[in-house]
C-alpha cells in the first residue's frame, strides 16, 4: 500500500521498481503474487486513482500540461519543423501514461513484432508475444445495437483476452461519424481484413477502448493492476517521490551490481536496498535519464556533466522513435453534434450529469475510428517503381559514415513493409472536433478556439525512418532531459506522410462520410494547400505533432547493434538491473503502443520469475 518512507525505514526489498506507471505496475502485480517476494514501487507522481479527470474518458484532455498529472516535456527545437518544439505529455501519476492516455486499445501488426526477433532478439517474435497480448486484457462484447452501428462483428472472440486485468470494450455512445467510418472505408476498397489482434489486418474500423464497461471508467495500470492488490503486505508504493539514481556496488573482479535506489521523499534524500534486482520502468524519457544520472551511459557525455562513469554504455538514450502526426479539420453539416459543442457550459453540465447518473453520454467515450493503410499512390505498377526510386534516393541521402549501428537493418525492415500491399504504413484516425496541428502545447492542439463544429483527420506515420535521442541536460534529476526526436530528418518520412495527407480529401468525399461534411464549409488550418506533393510536405513540416508513442531509448538489441538491454531485458554490463517499459522496444510497432507495453511487461514478469525461481 501507499505509505510514508519513514514507515519502511530499515527495510530492503527483493525488487525495487522505479516508476509506478504502465509497465511498472504490471511487474508489481505479477511479482507480488508470491507472498514471499517483497516489492517497493517508487513513483514520482501522486495517487489520483479516484480523480474524475483520470477516471472519466471524456475529461482526458483536461490533464494535459497540468503538472498534477503530466511531466509536460518539450522537444528541442526541431530543425525540420522550422524550429518548433513539440510538446510531449507523459503521465506523472500512479498508472503513468496509461492513466492519461486517450484509451485507444489497438494491436500491432505481426510484422512489427517479428521485426524485433529479426534484429537479433531471440524469442521476441509474434508467436511468443501473442499470448501476452491476450494475457493483459479481458474483452467485453458490445450490445447488439453497437455491433450493428459500429460494424464491430469483425471481433474474433477466440483470440481475445478472457481474464486479464485491463478491460476492453467498445463505446456505447456514438453518433453518425463513427457509424459512417467503417462503411466509408469499405467503399474505398479498404474494408477491415480481419480482427487486428490477429496481427494481420489493414483497413478502416472501430477500435476498442481501455474502459471498464461496468463503470464506463478508464481501465489502466493503476486501476486494473494496482488497485485490486493494494492490501498485499509484500507490496509497498511510495508516491510523490523522485528517484535520483540507482546505487551500484563494484566487486573485486570489477562486476558492477545494482544494489539499491536513491530518491527524494518529502525533501529528504534516502536510499533503499534491493536484494535481487532494480527494475527501471520510468518510461521512454526518464529511464535513459536515470541510467545516465547513475553513471551508465557514454563516458564522454557523463564526464561533460561531472558524473562518475560506472559502466560505459554507448547506446543509452539513442534510437528514439515516435509516430509523427499531422492532419486537417473539416466543418461538419449543421446540427451534427461534435466535441466542439462543449464550448457551451450548459452542454458540459448536461454531459457530466448524464455520465454521473447513468454512465452514458459523450463523457463515457473518446474517439473510436481508425484505419491502417498502405500508400494508395504506390499500389499501381507506376507507383511501385516510384516507391523504389524514392527509397533508393532517400537511402543514399541518409547513409553517412556516422549512421548508427541499428540503421541499416531497421531500414531494410521498413522498406519491406512499405513495399507490401498488405501492410499499413499509416494510421489515420478520426476525431469528432476541431484540432490545431500548428500549435505546440497539447491543450492548444485540442483547444476549441474556432467557431463551428468540425471533424478532424489525423495521419500518423506508422513506420518512421527518422531516429532521435534523449540525454540528460544537466546532472540534476529535477531538470528535464534534452529530447530530440529529429522528426522528418529522414527524407522518406515526409514523402510518405505527405502522400497520405493528400488522400484525406478523398476519404472526406466518399460516402457516407461525405454527407456529413458541410458543403463549402471551413477547413483547418485555414488557407491549407496540399495541391502538390511539395505543398503537402510543407503542410507536414508546419503542422507536425506527436501521436504520443515515443519509444526505443534503452533498446533491446545486441550491444554492437545499438542495444542497452539483452533479450531478458538486463542492462549490458550490470548485474541486478533490468529496464521494462516502452524504452526497450527496438523498433516502434504500427498503431498505438500501450498494448505492446502491457504485453512486454507481462512477458518481462515471466522472465524475472524464471530467473529467480
Ligand atoms: C497523452 C498520451 C496519449 C496516449 N494515447 C494512447 C492511446 O490512446 N493508446 C495507446 O495505445 N497508447 C497511448 N499512449 C501511449 C502509452 O500510453 C504509453 O506509451 C505507455 O503508457 C508508456 O508506458 P511506460 O510504462 O513505458 O511509461 P509510463 O506509463 O509513462 O510510466 C513511467 C512512470 O515512471 C514514473 N517516473 C518517471 N521518472 C521517475 C522518477 N525519476 N522517479 C519516480 N518515478 C518516475 C512516471 O511518473 C510514470 O508513472 C499515449 C500516451 C500519452 C502520453
Image: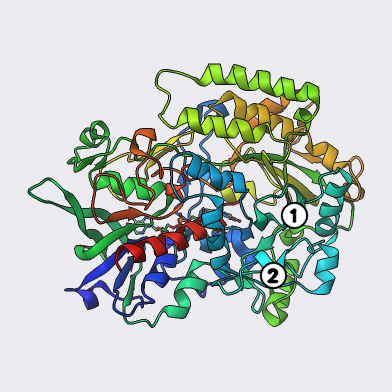
Is 173 left or right of 589, judged from the image as shown? right
Report whether 305 appears left or right of 545: left
Q: Vertically, is 74 above or below 60?
A: above
Report x, y in % for residue 388: 67, 21
Is 473 situated left or right of 111 in this image? left
Task: Tell me the colour scheme of the image.
Answer: rainbow
Mark 1 residue element: loop
Neighbour class for label 1 at 10 Å: few (<14), some, many (≥20)?
some
Q: Residue at x 70, y 30 (%)?
A: 498
What's the residue at 24%, 44% (across, down)? 573
* Quadrant housing the N terminus: bottom left
- Using the image, determine if residue 539 lies above or below residue 594: above
Nearer to me, 453 or 287: 287
Residue 54 image-quadrant placement: bottom right
Question: Spatial distance from mark 2 to mark 1, Cα to Cα?
Answer: 27 Å
Label 2 neighbourhood size at 10 Å, few (<14), some (14-19), many (20+)?
many
| Nearer to the camera, 382 or 460 | 382
Residue 304 in percent (x, y) is at: 23, 32
The residue beneath circle 1 is 194
Q: Residue at x 56, y 52 (%)?
A: 126
**Tag of residue 364:** 2
**Precedes in sequence: disc 2 or disc 1:** 1
The quadrant holding residue 351 is bottom right
Viewer can see residue 192:
yes
Q: Which mark is residue 527?
A: none
Amino acid at each position: 500500500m501507499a505509505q510514508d518512507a519513514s514507515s519502511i525505514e530499515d527495510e530492503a526489498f527483493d525488487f525495487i521498481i522505479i516508476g509506478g506507471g504502465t509497465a511498472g505496475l504490471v511487474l508489481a502485480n505479477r511479482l507480488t503474487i508470491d507472498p514471499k517476494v517483497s516489492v517497493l514501487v517508487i513513483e514520482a507522481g501522486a495517487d489520483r486513482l479516484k480523480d474524475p479527470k483520470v477516471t472519466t474518458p471524456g475529461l482526458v484532455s483536461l490533464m494535459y500540461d497540468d503538472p498534477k498529472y503530466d511531466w509536460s516535456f518539450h522537444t528541442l527545437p526541431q530543425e525540420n519543423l522550422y524550429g518548433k518544439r513539440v510538446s510531449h505529455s507523459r503521465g506523472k501519476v500512479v498508472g503513468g501514461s496509461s492513466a492519461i492516455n486517450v484509451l485507444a486499445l489497438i494491436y500491432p501488426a505481426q510484422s512489427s513484432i517479428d521485426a524485433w526477433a529479426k534484429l537479433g532478439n531471440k524469442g521476441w517474435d509474434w508467436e511468443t508475444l501473442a499470448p501476452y497480448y491476450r494475457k493483459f486484457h479481458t474483452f467485453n462484447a458490445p450490445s447488439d445495437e453497437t455491433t450493428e452501428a459500429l460494424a464491430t462483428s469483425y471481433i474474433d472472440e477466440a483470440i481475445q483476452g478472457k481474464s486479464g486485468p485491463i478491460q476492453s470494450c467498445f463505446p456505447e455512445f456514438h453518433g453518425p461519424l463513427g457509424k459512417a467510418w467503417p462503411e466509408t472505408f469499405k467503399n474505398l476498397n479498404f474494408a477491415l481484413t480481419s480482427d487486428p489482434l490477429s496481427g494481420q489486418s489493414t483497413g478502416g474500423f472501430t477500435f476498442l477502448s481501455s474502459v471498464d464497461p461496468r463503470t464506463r471508467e478508464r481501465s489502466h495500470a493503476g486501476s486494473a493492476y494496482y488497485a485490486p492488490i493494494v492490501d498485499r503486505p509484500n507490496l509497498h508504493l511510495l508516491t510523490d517521490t523522485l528517484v535520483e539514481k540507482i546505487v551500484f556496488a563494484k566487486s573485486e573482479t570489477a562486476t558492477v551490481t545494482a544494489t539499491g535506489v536513491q530518491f527524494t521523499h518529502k525533501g529528504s534524500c534516502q536510499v533503499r536496498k534491493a536484494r535481487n534486482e532494480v527494475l527501471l520502468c520510468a518510461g521512454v524519457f526518464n529511464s535513459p535519464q536515470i541510467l545516465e544520472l547513475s553513471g551508465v551511459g557514454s563516458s564522454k557525455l557523463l564526464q561533460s556533466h561531472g558524473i562518475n562513469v560506472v559502466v560505459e554504455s554507448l547506446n543509452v538514450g539513442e534510437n528514439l522513435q515516435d509516430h509523427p502526426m499531422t492532419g486537417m479539420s473539416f466543418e461538419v453539416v449543421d446540427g451534427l453534434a461534435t466535441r466542439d459543442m462543449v464550448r457551451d457550459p450548459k452542454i458540459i453540465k448536461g454531459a457530466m450529469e448524464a455520465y454521473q447518473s447513468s454512465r452514458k453520454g459523450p463523457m463515457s467515450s473518446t474517439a473510436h475510428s481508425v484505419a491502417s493503410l498502405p500508400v494508395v499512390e504506390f499500389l499501381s505498377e507506376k507507383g511501385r517503381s516510384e516507391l523504389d526510386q524514392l527509397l533508393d534516393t532517400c537511402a543514399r541521402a541518409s547513409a553517412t559514415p556516422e549512421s548508427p549501428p541499428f540503421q541499416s537493418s531497421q531500414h531494410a525492415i521498413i522498406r519491406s513493409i512499405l513495399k507490401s500491399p498488405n501492410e499499413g504504413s499509416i494510421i489515420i484516425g478520426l476525431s469528432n472536433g476541431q484540432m490545431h496541428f500548428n500549435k505546440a502545447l497539447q491543450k492548444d492542439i485540442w483547444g476549441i478556439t474556432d467557431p463551428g463544429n468540425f471533424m478532424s483527420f489525423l495521419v500518423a506515420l506508422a513506420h518512421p525512418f527518422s531516429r532521435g535521442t534523449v540525454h540528460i541536460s544537466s546532472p540534476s534529476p529535477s531538470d528535464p532531459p534534452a529530447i530530440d526526436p529529429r522528426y522528418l530528418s529522414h527524407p522518406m518520412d515526409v514523402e510518405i506522410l505527405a502522400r497520405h495527407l493528400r488522400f484525406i480529401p478523398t476519404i472526406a468525399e466518399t460516402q457516407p462520410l461525405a454527407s456529413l461534411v458541410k458543403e463549402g464549409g471551413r477547413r483547418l488550418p485555414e488557407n491549407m494547400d496540399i495541391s502538390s506533393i511539395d505543398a503537402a510536405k510543407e503542410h507536414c513540416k508546419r503542422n507536425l505533432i506527436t501521436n504520443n508513442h515515443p519509444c526505443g531509448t534503452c533498446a533491446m538489441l545486441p550491444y554492437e547493434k545499438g542495444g542497452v538491454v539483452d533479450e531478458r531485458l538486463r542492462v549490458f554490463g550490470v548485474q541486478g538491473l533490468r529496464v521494462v517499459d516502452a524504452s526497450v522496444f527496438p523498433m516502434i510497432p504500427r498503431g498505438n503502443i500501450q498494448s505492446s507495453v502491457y504485453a512486454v511487461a507481462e512477458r518481462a514478469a515471466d522472465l524475472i520469475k524464471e530467473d529467480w525461481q
